[in-house]
Amino acid sequence: AQTVTQSQPEMSVQEAETVTLSCTYDTSESDYYLFWYKQPPSRQMILVIRQEAYKQQNATENRFSVNFQKAAKSFSLKISDSQLGDAAMYFCAYKIGGGSNYKLTFGKGTLLTVNP
Amino acid sequence: NAGVTQTPKFRILKIGQSMTLQCAQDMNHNYMYWYRQDPGMGLKLIYYSVGAGITDKGEVPNGYNVSRSTTEDFPLRLELAAPSQTSVYFCASSYSSGSGKETQYFGPGTRLLVL
C-alpha cells in the first residue's frame, strides 16, 4: 500500500525567509503524481503545486518549488520569500497514474507558521 | 466559475438523525469525490463517482450513501448519524481524460458535529 509521510508536524519561518517542508512516500509504482495542497484556516484545500513522476525537472509555481528525488522517494516543498498569507496546514499527496486510478493518499500535514 | 460549492458550512446533528451534504461543481468535471478529515489527519476518501449514474466506495464508506444523477451534483447522505462521523467533509472534482494525471479541486468543506 502507498503511504505518505510528513515528518514535521509544525514548522515556523520569518516573513521574507525561505522554508522547506519535507515529504516522503512509499510506492512500487513507476507512474504516479505528487501534489502539495495548502489548507488555510478557512479549511479549503488549495492546490499549490503538482509533479509528474516521469518528469525529471522540478515543478515551480512562483515562490513555490519542489525538490523531487525519485530514487529517494522524497518530495519537499520550498517556499521562498515567505508571506503572512502562506501560514496554513500543508498536505503532501500521492496518486497512482493510469486512467482507472483516482485515489489521493494524503500525509498528516505540516502546520506552517509565518512570523512577522 | 464558482468551482466546487458545498452546503451547509456547519451543522450540528443529534445521534440517529440523518442529513444530506450537498456538493455541486460548474467545471464540467466528470469525476467527483467525497473525503472526510478528522482532527490532525489527512483526508480519507469516502465515495467517488466517475460520471453520472456511476459511484463506488472509497476507504471509509460505512455509514454513508451517495448518488450522482447529474454531472454537476454529488450529494452525500448520512443515515443514523453517530459521534464517529464528527468530521470535516470535503467534496472534490476533477476532469479525467483517461490518463490518470488529473488534478482534484476541492470545495470549502462542511463541518459536521454529531452529539
Image (cartoon, helix red, strand yellow):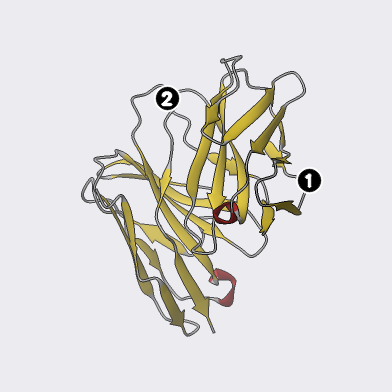
Is residue A4 found left or right of A49 in the rendered image? right
Q: Is residue B36 visible?
A: yes
From the viewer's perspective, is residue A68 above or below residue B107? above
Is residue B6 found left or right of B101 in the rendered image? left
Mark 1 neighbour class, 10 Å CA radius: few under 14, some 14 to 19, many 20 or more:
some
User: What residue sits 47% from the left and 62% below the top?
Assistant: B89
Q: Is residue A2 visible?
A: no
Instruction: Where is residue B26? Give x, y as percent.
Output: 24, 47
Instruction: Where is residue B114? Give x, y as percent.
Output: 52, 79
The chain to which mark 2 is attached is: A
B60 vs B35, nearest the viewer: B35
Circle 2 residue = A99
Looking at the rendered structure, the kind of residue marked 1 is Ser
Mark seen at residue A7: 1
Is residue B63 found left or right of A15 in the rendered image? left
**Which tag is nearer the camera, tag 1 or tag 2?**
1
